[in-house]
Image (spheres, coloured by chain):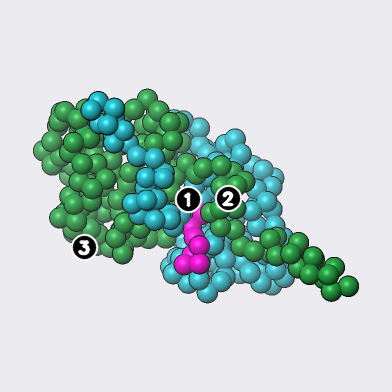
Amino acid sequence: MRWIAACLVFLVIPFSKPTDTFDLRQRYGDPRTERFRVRPDVTLIVSYGTDHKSCVLEIEPRKEFLQEMVANETLSKDLTDQLLDEIAPPGIRGKEIMPLGSNVVSGSCNSGMTFGEYENLSINVSYGFCDKTIGVHSATVTFKRSACEQWHKPQVVKTGQTAKAKESP
Amino acid sequence: MLIATAATLSQTSSEFHALYGKPDAEVFNVRSGVLLSVEYGEDGEACAMRIEPQRDAGISWLDAPAADMSKMAEVLDEVVPPEQRGKELGPGQFVGIHCGGAETPRDYENVVVSNYYYCERPLKFRGFEVRFKRSACEKVKPETFPPPASKPH
């Protein structure tokens, strides 16, 4: 009787246990996107291409993953530059077509975006915002390989409160 | 030399794991056209999940059709089966962004399950969100907004 009870416990535990990354990978294969904590309050979201290599790298202040609004916190320019050099060192960018910071698109309320264009990738840094601290909200590196085609579609920004797209089609 | 340079152009998942450790959130393709986003707690187990359709290329958020409820429910039952949710306690509290007119979440012993909407008119069903109630999920909680009666959108 005890033996049967013990067997039942082993059968029930796996079904009542919350899901972890191992369970999900077993069931659905490798994720298309992962988020890492690269500094205590800074995350790096990596989206992979059909060749299983990184296609889009996005640095931003840590926030709830499902939350689509920008975080209240911002990153300093120095930290952003340091992290960009860490994840996309100048050596891998290829020939510089348009240096980062040379082209600024201004928005309302001190917000803006600056772009960098290189042979192998492009970099996009967005900063500022109306009632929030001036600083960097996100920095995105997008690789130009053909395996990254699915991530190259223009991101359409939602209106209202859900302001920022995390996943492109 | 050329091979070495090419290898460093883009990194694989294992290289990122080696640099930064285990991811704290992931997105999976769970079916053709269905995505599962998961954020993990300090114990490495899921704390928040969203099940939603993958949009077709070139279709904006707002132009995308409503999600297929039965298809999303099938994935919900797969990742958080009813026996894992615990006893149903009734209507739950809205968490995160609440769009006026959205259905009240369903509160269970172990999780809260919400239908997911964008703030658009008319509201379209966009998928499901699941929040786990374990103490390890405290840091994953979003800001809770007041109900629509006190803060209309």
**Camera sees residue B114:** no
Please tell me the numbered disc located at residue A24.
2
- Residue that appears at 28% across and 40% down: A141
Task: Tell me the amino acid under the disc marked 1.
Answer: Glu
**Which type of secondary structure does the marked residue at label 1 adopt?**
strand
Q: Looking at the rendering, which quadrant does residue A20 occupy?
A: bottom right
Q: Which colour represents chain B?
A: cyan
Residue B64 relative to residue A141: left or right: right
> For mark 1, what is the residue?
B26
User: What secondary structure is found at the residue carrying circle 3?
Assistant: loop
Q: Is residue A146 left or right of residue A131?
A: right
Q: Amino acid at mark 2?
A: Leu
The subunit carrying tag 2 is: A
| Mark 3 lies on residue | A133
Q: Nearer the viewer, residue B41 or B50?
A: B41
Q: Quadrant of the C terminus of chain B?
A: bottom left
Q: Chain of mark 3?
A: A
Mark 2 or mark 3: whose residue is earlier in sequence? 2
Q: Are marks 2 and 1 in contact (CB under 8 Å)?
A: yes
Marks 3 and 1: same chain?
A: no
User: What's the residue type where badge 3 is placed?
Assistant: Thr
**Residue B60 position within the rendered picture, expressed as x and y whole percent measured from the top left:** 44, 37
Residue located at (61% from left, 39% from top): B31
- Residue that lies at the very extreme toward the left in this rendered image: A102
- Labels 2 and 1 share a subunit: no
Disc 3, disc 1: CB below 8 Å? no
One can see residue A64 in this view: yes
Residue B110 appears left or right of B150: right
Residue A21, given in percent of the width and then of the height, sits at 53, 54
Which tag is nearer the camera, tag 3 or tag 1? 1
